[in-house]
Image: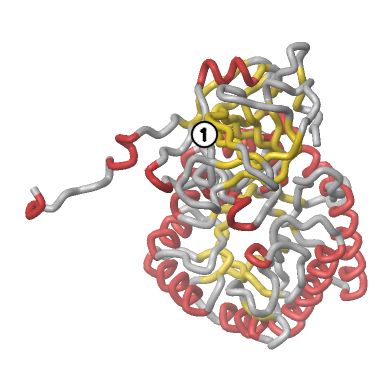
Amino acid sequence: MFKPHLKTNDEGELVIGGISVVELADRFGTPLYIMDENRIRENYQKFYQAYSKRWSDVKIWYAYKANSNTSICKILWDEGCGAEVSSICELKTALKIGVPGKDIISNGNYKTRSELELGIENDILINVDNLQELELVNEIAGNKDKKARIGFRVNPNVKAPTHPHIATGLRESKFGFDVESGRALEAYKKAAKMNNIKVESIHSHIGSQILDPKPFGEQAEKMMNLVAKIRDKVGIELETVDMGGGLGVPYEPGEEDLTPDEMAEEVISTVKRVIEEKNLHEPTIVFEPGRSMVADAGIILSKVGYTKKREKTPDWIAIDAGMNALVRPALYDAYHHIVAANKMNEEPIDVFNVAGPLCESGDYLGKERELPRVGQGDLIAIFDTGAYGLAMSSQHTAHPRPGMILVNSGNAEVIRKPEDCEDLTRLDKVPEWLK
């Protein structure tokens, strides 16, 4: 399960970004999110190169929902990666770090008026999700004497082999306009008649954590056929085809990887074939990777507090990071690899359940994991937590969220301070009648 950016030193300590996690725990405490800057840059370049060598006009927009920490987003913008945002706060983060509107795209099935106003003011591309939103975008753009740049999120009815909670391209999904019923085409016809709308794009996203290239090929075929139909029936040559994200990462030992090259070959070969069949012009092709940019660049470092013996079932190890820091195991029954980070050279002696400190039985990070014997003060590292760790964190049972540090070739810097008890109540207000 070791990734090339993770090492072990002579003392048997896990090393990330050129620094022992034992040193990082001493300096910054636990629990702690750790992100490897160089790995993020490598992930982006691998993805970009896979597509740019197959298609001349390709753009990559990082899905901020995976990890919207300002420094993480800035790293990717430095590499030339634009922003895919799904809230006004993500949009403000992108603008704050200097991403221009032309390199920002807004998605989501519930965009607020203020979110749309800010987006239109900055000339971002808005993927409209429903007809009421289209009317609102047209109204806001008219009030500002602007033409809003839009595309439509369409639902191609592609079944993705992933958890049902993150499969988003099926007909019954809450997202987008249905392709097969003709509603997507009707949306383009309606938008073409609006005075304050510039129709540029088409967008779909079939799901997340996909490790099979075939659904991406099916998505590309349905998208490009719809592009041809929009040209023929509406008279619009779309400038941009946005394929969304979805490329997964191998979380489990032995899980087969889908490389960006394999995904790109499936998608681009399909796009080229349909373009030739339908005599289409070559559009800008956009991708919105999130998880594949940052997941394996991050670990959670935690400390063992207690151990507990059980009969006829694995012993329990209690650590100071729980589902408040990483909810994926509890929410999706997701696997994250777990190691004894200060005993990397020791052989496993048994299987253990690894629990967090929260007051519910669902608070676990992994079950039946092979580990060496650990005790109070030993360090536990949880792998592949750079995506949807902090982004889905909570203050469950009043546990403050961990801080996050960035490591790079022997350097380490705090990029998000850990919360404390004051942060938990800072926004609270007691009414006068309770004083």
The structure residue drawn at horizontal position 81% and vertical position 29%, both measured from the top left corner, is 4
The image's colouring method is secondary structure
Which quadrant of the structure image shows residue 220?
bottom right
The structure residue drawn at horizontal position 56% and vertical position 22%, both measured from the top left corner, is 377
Q: Quadrant of the N terminus?
A: top right
Residue type at mark 1: give it: Asp
Image x and y of residue 335, in percent: 70, 48
Q: Secondary structure at mark 1?
A: loop
Looking at the image, the residue that sits furthest to the bottom is 181
Q: Is residue 28 above or below residue 424?
A: above
Q: Is residue 139 left or right of residue 307?
A: left
Any part of residue 242 in sight: no
Nearer-the-camera pick, 154 or 144: 154
Looking at the image, the residue that sits furthest to the top is 10
Q: Is residue 72 left or right of residue 42?
A: left
The structure residue drawn at horizontal position 68% and vertical position 79%, both measured from the top left corner, is 171
Q: Is residue 175 left or right of residue 144?
A: right
Tell me the residue that label 1 is attached to.
Answer: 320
Any part of residue 21 in sight: yes
Q: Is residue 251 above or below residue 72?
A: below
Q: Is residue 382 above or below residue 258?
A: above
Which quadrant of the structure image shows residue 265?
bottom right
**Disc count in the image?**
1
Nearer-the-camera pick, 359 or 165: 359
Q: Is residue 280 above or below residue 182?
A: above
Nearer-the-camera pick, 268 or 20: 20
Image x and y of residue 15, in percent: 71, 21
Image x and y of residue 175, in percent: 60, 72
Mark 1 neighbour class, 10 Å CA radius: few under 14, some 14 to 19, many 20 or more: many
Image x and y of residue 188, in percent: 63, 79
